[in-house]
Amino acid sequence: MATINKERQFYGLVFTIPATIYMGVFLIYPLCLVLFNSFFFIDAMDPTISEFVGSENYSEVLSDDRFWGTVGNTLMFTCLAVIFEFILGFLIALAITSLKFGQQLARTLFLLPLMIAPLVAAMAWRFIFSSEFGLLNWTLFHLGIIDNPSAIPWLNSADLSIISAIITDIWLTTPFIVLIMVAGLQSLPKEVTEAAYVDGVGWWKEVFHIKLPMLRPVIAVAVVMRMIDAARTFDIIWILTGGGPRFSSEVLSTQIYRTLTRYGDIGISSATAVLFTLGLMLVSALVFKLITSGNSQTEVK
Amino acid sequence: MEIINTRIKGVDGEMKKNPTLLFGLRVNDVILFVAVILFSVCYLLPFIAMVLSSFKPTTEVISSPPTFLPSEWGLNNYIHMFNNFDFLGSLWNTLIIALGSSLLSVSIGSIAGYAVARQFSKFTKHFFVLALVARIIPPVTLAIPILEMIRSVGLIDTHFGLMLVHAGINIPFVIWMTSGFFQDIPKELEDAAYVDGCNRFAIYFKVVLPVAAPGIAATSIFTLMLSWNEFLFALLLTNINAKTAPVGISEFLNVYSSEWGAMAAAATLFTVPILILSALIQRRIVEGMAAGAVKG
């Protein structure tokens, strides 16, 4: 036994070493470098000139109103996008799984938006949202909802720009929730749903008291995955609004990118990135715990 | 069991009120089917509108009021795009980088995914946690040092540079996804080969991989697509020689300000092949995507 164990340990190491080295070079080392840089002032013109400044970068970031505005935007973007994607996606998945035929066709159609690059989706929605030639405003105008076709400045107003980005994200990734929930619903044991049906449990009760609690682990993974991706959104914002107007739709990813490329401020952008990464790890661990922990209680009911 | 059967019959009996159409299909089912399909087609309208725009005369693309269907179908936007921009070149760059990074990440990641699935040692468990945590790191966080690293080794604006970076981002994903597939493979085959005196490398390559081929294929499709669509690092690390299609598309509206027609044409050309491909292999993709979440 001992030799088998040793042999297993040896191969466990050998099989994972290439990936460990690769992740070390491209993920762990850069992460350490970001942490290291966040304590330095680094000259934008000549990066070799650097000076240890302790926690100065952090206090500068944390006392900056724009940073907190961006944090607020990122939270709002993530929460609204994930909530609407989940509700919409779950309803569509329920509709698809109750189809007596054509489930495959419906699934394929919903797979398509998911394959569209976020960048292309944002471009398509720029057409839709445009206040001069956008289909959305003109449709609303023809329906008599607004009185002139440029009444709603979807992308050019500080109040609406982030909403437009959220709509684009919801459109692009609801299908992800649809596909995962369809698979989840199909994996539920037939006996349970049939028994509920026979016992005359109503549709709402069946969905809320039987299906949703049983799908809890699936939902936890799907929601946390979506949350992480939504919080990291870059492409949609960068293409759709560029973070504007006046930083009204700026999220952490675009702010860090801008601080790095436009202002060349490695120290500040590193400190922001460290705070962002830590925050995201903490929040995703919390949310995952939150969704999975209530599990046993609901099942007892 | 009998009770359930009779009850179900009872329910069926009630359902008979619902008039049937041809082939014994119920009206409600047909209505639901039509509604779902109609909804899913409408769902694609924002993208369809852009594809249609690419076939409009150039001035009509941004006409106010807008049209949905082209008044006159034509390839002007495509011809203009090919004559003025090297979009084919950037498509080629994207393809090379996507293929290279997929090959790299899948070959390195899947063997690690196998070790994780079989839990060879304590180390593999810690390793898996590391891979999961790595998946949370925002790419923009890595952007700062990776720009420095790639610049310092002189790989800026090269296929190889972006390929290495894409593979790095995708490896945690590959480990996570393949470990799920490997868990589904019964151990008996491997045990038999082990007793026969095969070493673990031989077992992995000769016994496990052939069985896991569909899962590996699904994973490769995902890594291909992730790299094909990736924008942030492409924007940061390529500009002329290795410029990828997403970067090219983004430039139509930024640098050349109002090339909406050419942009729509380029975006269509970039996306439609992927859509056709994914419709053809949709079962693989859906299974792969669902496997991760449903198995947890």
Image (tube, rainbow, N blue to C red):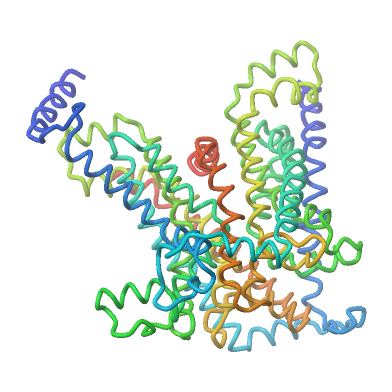
- In which image quadrant can residue B82 be found? bottom right
From the viewer's perspective, is residue B45 above or below residue A72?
A: above
From the viewer's perspective, is residue B274 above or below residue A121?
A: above
Rendered location of residue B88, percent (x, y): 71, 56
User: Which quadrant does the N terminus of chain B fall into?
Assistant: top left
Rendered location of residue B98, percent (x, y): 72, 49
Please state if B196 lies on the left or on the right of B255 as rendered. right
Q: Residue at x 47, y 66 (%)?
A: A168
- In which image quadrant can residue A201 be found? top left
Please state if A41 lies on the left or on the right of B245 as rendered. right
- In which image quadrant can residue B8 be found? top left
Residue at the farthest top position: B196
Rendered location of residue A254, percent (x, y): 63, 74
Q: Residue at x 37, y 40 (%)?
A: A185
| Any part of residue B64 in sight | yes
| Any part of residue A82 in sight | no
Q: Nearer the viewer, residue A78 or B121?
A: A78
From the viewer's perspective, is residue B185 above or below residue A278?
A: above
Q: Nearer the viewer, residue B29 or B124?
A: B29
From the viewer's perspective, is residue B6 above or below residue A262?
A: above
Rendered location of residue A28, percent (x, y): 77, 58
